Image (spheres, grey):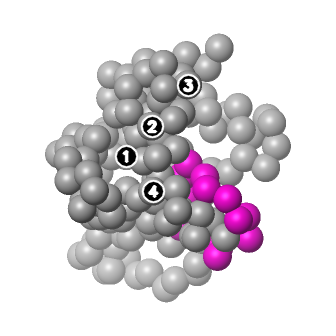
Amino acid sequence: MPPRVALYVENCLAESSPNPPVSEKTLETWFDQWLEILTPDLPPALSYEIGLRLTNDAQIQELNTQYRQQNKPTDVLAFASLEADLPQSQEMLASQPLYLGDIVVSIDTAERQAQQQEHSLSTELAWFTAHGLLHLLGWDHPDEESLMQMLQQQVILQKGVSIIIDLE
């Protein structure tokens, strides 16, 4: 049986933009498909939980400053819970979802980059959220080679949800 994810979406832009760029159902479908593709890389669990926060440049800049000491907006931040050595028994993993962490995406940046890349906001949002998911699972890109490996994995994830991205 493919892994299931409980996705908790917080749309911090609800007052200014009540309609999210992608429905929660679509987001859940993406994450379900991606976790199925990434099954070999997943820690074993009955199911998984992820938090997703859609925000603006000002809010993501605050988080970027606080947690990464970079006082500027960014596209996506990921806060992986698996980086902490939390005790997890087999009984726990079999009875409750494994919390993978939180992904924060700036819709402001996603809109700008979607225009620059000449594709839709939903495509850019899929790109950012897939990138965040990979970070939650331990992927990182401290150098050009690891960045290219991560980007290629993102292309695979996008293809899994019928979004075609060309890195060229």
Q: Earlier in the sequence, mark 1 or mark 4?
A: 1
Q: Is residue 148 above or below residue 1?
A: above
Q: Is residue 108 above or below residue 124?
A: below
Which label sits on residue 116? 3
Which residue does the numbered mark 4 point to in the structure image?
A: 56
Q: How many residues crowd mark 3 within 10 Å: few (<14), some (14–19), many (20+)?
A: few
Q: Is residue 12 above or below residue 161?
A: below
Indicate which label's residue lies in the foreground, 1 or 2.
2
- Where disc 2 sits, the SS reads helix
Q: Which residues are magenta?
A: 66-80
Task: Verify CB contact (< 8 Å) between mark 1 and mark 2.
Answer: no
Q: Earlier in the sequence, mark 2 or mark 3?
A: 2
Q: How many residues crowd mark 2 within 10 Å: few (<14), some (14–19), many (20+)?
A: some
Q: Is residue 133 left or right of residue 92?
A: right
- At label 2, the amino acid type is Glu
Q: Earlier in the sequence, mark 1 or mark 2?
A: 1
Query: Marks 1 and 4, Cα distance to the nearest angstrom?
Result: 27 Å
Query: Marks 1 and 2, Cα distance to the nearest angstrom?
Result: 26 Å
Which residue does the numbered mark 2 point to in the structure image?
A: 111
- Where disc 3 sits, the SS reads helix
Q: Is residue 61 left or right of residue 92?
A: right
Indicate which label's residue lies in the foreground, 1 or 4.
4
Q: Is residue 133 left or right of residue 167?
A: left
- At label 3, the amino acid type is Gln
Which label sits on residue 35? 1
Q: Earlier in the sequence, mark 1 or mark 3?
A: 1
* Of the pair 115 and 133, the residue shown nearer to us: 115
Q: Is residue 146 visible?
A: yes
- At label 4, the amino acid type is Asn
